[in-house]
Image (spheres, rainbow, N blue to C red):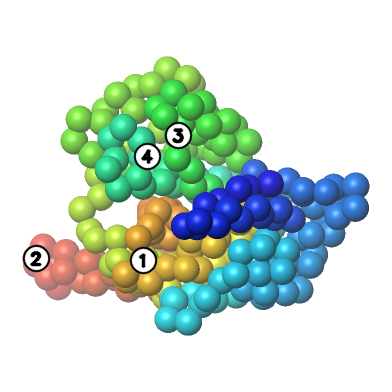
């Protein structure tokens, strides 16, 4: 149940699947049944009818995601893009994703976005880390955020810091848009995460979910552009090294 305010109106929404991926009325509509319905419908129709969130996909980059579960033995690599209320005037979301590559497909097992204070966020990241069976969590940090890595390591998480310098729009186009037909979403990926991806355009206010997905795909070296860039760099290394 979610109460939202739009001007003088208050809207009560009862999404069939909540932000944690649980069924609203499991006795009547268990999550397994809802997942089957979601797979049969396109995401725009499912969002409007079952989530009570009309979605306009005109002008957006992505439509109709493909749903499929990753193999049980697939090793999970994670990505966390932190955002904290007191540090962000734009009120960005935390972005968290876990997935890996299998047989020329990218599987996203877990994907979530949220806003919370620092302590609550640490607890949530730790919980998602263990729930997803992550072997290594990559963390995007800016200057002076090394304390994030220290805190997660103290909690027993295996983490690696990353400093991103390229633009979000470039990453999203390069790694998500070009590889969209080969990306598979698990049903445990939150509806809010998927909704933000499907609403993405160059002018959208929030892009934390598609950028999280892009960064995860990038560090795993998956996809059309990633491979071509790697080959291009190898060619330049060959020329500069004089080994020809």
Residue lying furthest bottom in this view? 58
Residue 146, compared with residue 196, is above or below; it is above
The Cα–Cα distance between marks 1 and 4, rounded to whole angstroms, is 19 Å
Residue 132, compared with residue 149, is above or below; it is below
- Mark nearer the N terminus (1 vs 2): 1
Q: Which residue is mark 4?
A: 82
Question: In terms of secondary structure, where does tag 1 sit?
Answer: loop
Q: Which residue is mark 3?
A: 116
The Cα–Cα distance between marks 3 and 2, rounded to whole angstroms, is 48 Å
Label 2 Cα neighbours within 10 Å, binned few <14 / some 14-19 / many ≥20: few
Label 3 Cα neighbours within 10 Å, binned few <14 / some 14-19 / many ≥20: some
Q: Nearer the viewer, mark 3 or mark 2?
A: 3
Label 4 Cα neighbours within 10 Å, binned few <14 / some 14-19 / many ≥20: many
The Cα–Cα distance between marks 1 and 3, rounded to whole angstroms, is 21 Å
Q: Residue 199 location, x and y as percent?
A: 47, 68
Q: Residue 133 location, x and y as percent?
A: 60, 37
Of residues 20 and 176, which is closer to you in this image?
A: 20
Which of the 4 image quadrants contains residue 214? bottom left
Of residues 227 and 66, which is closer to you in this image?
A: 66
- Mark nearer the N terminus (4 vs 3): 4
Which of the 4 image quadrants contains residue 43? bottom right
Question: In terms of secondary structure, where does tag 2 sit?
Answer: helix
Q: Residue at x 53, y 47 (%)?
A: 112
Question: In terms of secondary structure, where does tag 4 sit?
Answer: loop
Q: Which residue is mark 2?
A: 240
- Mark nearer the N terminus (1 vs 4): 4
- Mark nearer the N terminus (3 vs 2): 3
């Amino acid at each position: 149940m979610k109460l939202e305010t739009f001007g003088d109106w208050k809207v009560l929404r009862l999404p069939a699947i909540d932000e944690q991926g649980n069924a609203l009325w499991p006795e009547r509509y268990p999550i397994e049944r809802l997942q089957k319905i979601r797979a049969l419908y396109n995401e725009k129709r499912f969002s409007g009818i079952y989530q009570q969130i009309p979605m306009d996909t005109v002008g957006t980059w992505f439509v109709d995601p493909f749903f499929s579960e990753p193999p049980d033995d697939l090793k999970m690599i994670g990505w966390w893009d932190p955002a904290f209320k007191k540090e962000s005037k734009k009120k960005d979301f935390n972005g968290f994703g876990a997935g890996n590559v299998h047989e020329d497909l990218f599987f996203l097992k877990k994907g979530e976005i949220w806003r919370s204070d620092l302590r609550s966020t640490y607890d949530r990241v730790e919980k998602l880390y263990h729930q997803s069976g992550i072997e290594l969590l990559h963390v995007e940090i800016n200057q002076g955020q090394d304390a994030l890595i220290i805190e997660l390591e103290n909690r027993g998480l295996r983490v690696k810091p990353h400093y991103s310098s390229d633009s979000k729009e470039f990453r999203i186009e390069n790694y998500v848009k070009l590889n969209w037909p080969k990306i598979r979403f698990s049903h445990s990926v939150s509806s809010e995460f998927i909704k933000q991806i499907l609403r993405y355009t160059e002018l959208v206010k929030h892009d934390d979910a598609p950028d999280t997905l892009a960064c995860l795909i990038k560090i795993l070296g998956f996809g059309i552009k990633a491979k071509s860039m790697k080959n291009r760099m190898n060619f330049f290394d060959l020329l500069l090294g004089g080994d020809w």
